[in-house]
Image: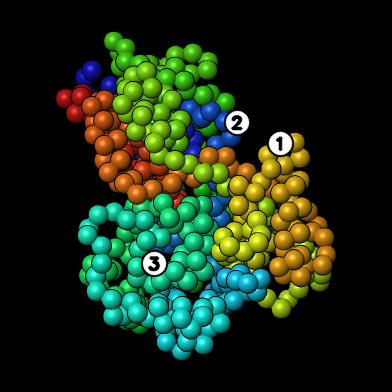
Amino acid sequence: MVEGSRRSVVVVGAGVGGLAAAWELRQEGKRLGLPLDIKVMEASARVGGSVVTERVEGCIVEGGPDCILSEKPGGLGLIEDLGLSAHLSPTNEASRKTYVLSGGQLHALPDGLILLVPTRIMPFITTRLFSWPGKLRMGLDLLLPRGGDGADETLGDFIRRRLGHEALVKLGEPLVAGIHSGDPETMSLAATFPRFREMEKEDRSLILSMTRRMKKARKIRKQGGGRKAVGGRPHTMFVTLDEGMGLLVDELVEQIGRENVQTECPVSNLTRGDEGWEVHAADGCVQADAVLLACPAHAAAGITERMAPNLAEELRSIPYVSSATVTLAYAENTFPSHVGGFGAVVPGGEPTPLKAFTWATTKFFGRAPEGTVLMRCFLRAADVVEGEGMRDRMVDTAAGELRRVLGVAAEPLWGRSYFWEDAMPQYVVGHLQRVELIEQLVDGQPGLELAGGAYHGSGIPDTVEFSRARARALVAGLRRSDG
């Protein structure tokens, strides 16, 4: 084709990664003077993947992610590029407190505890969360030599090695379950928490390294640096959108063009034809010059099975787990006020199906009308009984557990539940090597790219950054083929 001629691209999957990639394709095509016809094909009846925001009785209810980490540029960068900066909202730092449910009691995380690592002595010494042997074992990190042989290891092995078993049970496991819905005994340290690996390599001790980094961050803030402002207030560690994270999805679809996004359109497989790629979907075959697969890895495996069985085998080896959330609304005058903060995480050994819960109306601004308390509960997916009535059972389970754990005597005004089946990719030991092999196999298929959260980070910032980068690479490849 001559330079400047229109090219067609199909994006499979309309989660945040697929939508971000489609948006980036349009922007990069315009920048390079390469007109693109972009079609997004989504198997389900809605877009956004697990990002969904509902309005219920004047409340903002998040079914999936409710915020993004501001220190990672991918999420904020896309929000700014879409023109949504005015909608950014920080967390309520005046109520910033996180708890661990241990022995049936809520224990506030001691001040200065950053990502499992204590950086302040007195709050750590006086906390009742850890036993004295547990505290001494965590403090031993100051004396231990560097460990590991450079090979990947599980997050569980690393935490035990540096901070001890109690730190793993009371902090590592519940935090990982809350963030990744994963198991530290199988998770890859290199793929999920590479910062820990870097800290040990550079400074030997996690405590010394984190303390040094915190001092450096405070110095930058004193000098007027640090996070940008949100509505006149500095960015907090986590930020959200004032109308809910669904606003990000809505704006992406609007700028891509709703006519270019097709739902209930599952793709079965890909083949190569004389004119490029043939995308076989439920309503027929679509011709494309390039294809970007932004669906879950197991779905991408099914699509590439006939065309590239070796690639499909590696994609299928990335495991996934399900997740479940419930939001409950209570009248404020019936809700206990003796505790409050951002939320609590729950170690796996506690006799409850809860793995975490948050006070949504305390953590964020403007989540509900005055007089209403919103609680967001995360259930262990293995404890969710699927089938008829599942949603109602999830609501009843969450309400019953809050009654037991927090002493909430009143019944909720209403509840909403969400179950995301096989939605969370698990980065097990060897994940980075597996992804490297997958990318080598994809390189042997010109005009094909992979995007989404299965490869280089499953949170919104990492998923967006990686997906946009693959979209730019795809456009660059099309432009080279024009030449």
Q: Earlier in the sequence, mark 1 or mark 2?
A: 2
Q: Earlier in the sequence, mark 2 or mark 3?
A: 2
| Nearer to me, 445 or 363 | 445
Front-lying residue, 258 or 458: 458
Q: The disc labelled 1 sits on which kind of residue? A: Gly
37 and 270: which one is in front?
Answer: 270
Q: Where does label 2 land, which residue? A: 45
* 69 relative to 81, above or below: below
Residue displayed at 48% across by 41% down: 320
Amino acid under label 3? Arg
Q: Amino acid at mark 2?
A: Ala
Residue found at the very far front of the displayed protein: 133
Numbered circle sitting on residue 387? 1
Left or right: residue 405 versus residue 477 is right
Q: Quadrant of residue 408?
A: bottom right
Residue count near mark 2 (Cα–Cα under 10 Å), binned few <14, some 14–19, many ≥20: few
| Mark 3 surroundings: few (<14), some (14-19) or many (≥20) residues within 10 A | some
Q: What is the C-alpha distance between the residues marked 3 and 1?
A: 39 Å
Mark in the foreground, 3 or 1: 3
- SS for callout 3: helix
Query: In what element is the residue under mark 2?
Result: loop
